[in-house]
Image (spheres, helix red, strand yellow):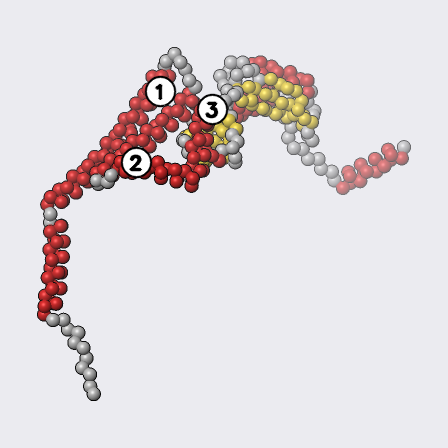
């Protein structure tokens, strides 16, 4: 017995239904894309978003400039605050302004898309609580940054050492601190990771200069010459707070007598003053014929060495 294969061809009615559905879908797409009112509405939304972004950028620049001018006017007032403290507060306030204005701009953009911002703000408390449990490091960074600024541990422009990094403080934020080393590297530290800080910019520095004198020279004469040099420096360098002082003989080396001179300087000026003192002391001692030691090498020939050994043995026998 032969079985006939099922007929898979659609009937004319079903084909008409499919073509009609496709035509209807295509017509709806064309109607959506050619709807003039819809395109006008989208254009208005895009213009509104662009306007919000432009206005936010302008407001941030204007407010930052106003804050900067306020600090300039305040610097001329009767109540004075250290420049390092003012720079820190200036950078911090400018950052806070940027955060606040751009946050408001984001809310305005969401409102332009007809998103219920009030619901987001209402749910922010619950979301913030959930995030707080998972972002304890972030909270710690913010709290530590607040106390760094409040206690004035260091400020923008200070020269500090944090861990292995050493350099000038470029920026102090509520979350991170940026330090730029003298070779150009920028180190960024989360405030919560800052446990020890060495600040070189608060108190005066001390320049330490060691001068080597040959053993053949008269140590007393060399000390007198260095004292005369220190007396003649008074008022020459404004970076020097107190007149340089000769402490005396520091060490007795293999081929030299080392004398130490110290000078109290303005903060972070000890390197510059130390280099200047070394240069000027070298010229001063050269003018007075006091020799600074240099490596010496004594060479003996084999005959001279043998004769010297014979003489030594003869002296020992006597």
Q: Which residue is mark 1?
A: 71
Q: Which residue is mark 2?
A: 121
Answer with mark 2 or mark 3, whichever residue precedes in sequence: 2
State the residue in front, 89 or 132. 132
Please state the horizontal and vertical placement of residue 218, each as a whole percent of the image: 69, 20
Answer with mark 3 or mark 1, whichever residue precedes in sequence: 1
Of all residues, the one furthest to the right in this rendering is 318
User: Residue 293 appears in which quarter of the rendering?
Assistant: top right
The quadrant of the rendering that contains the C terminus is top right
User: Residue 285 appears in which quarter of the rendering?
Assistant: top right
Q: Looking at the picture, does residue 305 appear above or below residue 2? A: above
Residues at circles 2 and 3 in contact by the CB criterion of under 8 Å:
no
Drawn side of residue 241 relative to residue 174, left or right: right
Q: Secondary structure at mark 1?
A: helix
**Residue drawn at x 32%, y 23% as measured from the top left:** 67
Of badges 3 and 1, the one in the foreground is: 3
**Residue drawn at x 81%, y 38% as measured from the top left:** 309
Of all residues, the one furthest to the bottom in this rendering is 1
Q: Which residue is mark 3?
A: 151
């Amino acid at each position: 017995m032969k079985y006939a294969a099922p007929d898979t061809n659609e009937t004319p009615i079903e084909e008409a239904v499919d073509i009609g559905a496709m035509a209807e879908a295509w017509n709806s797409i064309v109607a959506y894309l050619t709807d003039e009112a819809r395109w006008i509405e989208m254009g208005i939304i895009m213009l509104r978003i662009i306007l919000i972004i432009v206005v936010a950028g302008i407001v941030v620049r204007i407010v930052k400039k106003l804050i900067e001018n306020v600090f300039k006017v305040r610097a001329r007032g009767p109540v004075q605050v250290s420049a390092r403290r003012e720079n820190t507060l200036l950078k911090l306030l400018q950052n806070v302004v940027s955060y606040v204005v751009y946050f408001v701009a984001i809310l305005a953009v969401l409102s332009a898309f007809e998103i219920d911002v009030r619901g987001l703000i209402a749910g922010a408390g619950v979301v913030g609580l959930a995030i707080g449990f998972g972002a304890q490091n972030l909270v710690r960074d913010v709290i530590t940054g607040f106390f760094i600024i409040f206690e004035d541990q260091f400020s923008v422009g200070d020269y500090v050492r944090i861990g292995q990094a050493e350099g000038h403080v470029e920026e102090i934020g509520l979350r991170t601190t940026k330090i730029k080393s003298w070779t150009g590297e920028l180190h960024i530290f989360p405030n919560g990771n800052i446990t020890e800080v060495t600040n070189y910019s608060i108190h005066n520095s001390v320049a330490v200069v060691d001068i080597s004198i040959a053993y053949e020279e008269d140590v007393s004469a060399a000390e007198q010459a260095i004292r005369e040099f220190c007396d003649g420096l008074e008022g020459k360098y404004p970076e020097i707070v107190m007149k340089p002082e000769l402490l005396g003989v520091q060490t007795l080396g293999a081929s030299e007598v080392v004398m130490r001179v110290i000078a109290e300087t303005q903060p972070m000026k000890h390197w510059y003053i130390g280099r200047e003192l070394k240069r000027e002391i070298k010229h001063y001692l050269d003018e007075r014929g006091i020799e600074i030691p240099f490596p010496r090498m004594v060479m003996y020939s084999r005959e001279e060495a043998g004769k010297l050994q014979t003489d030594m043995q003869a002296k020992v026998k006597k």
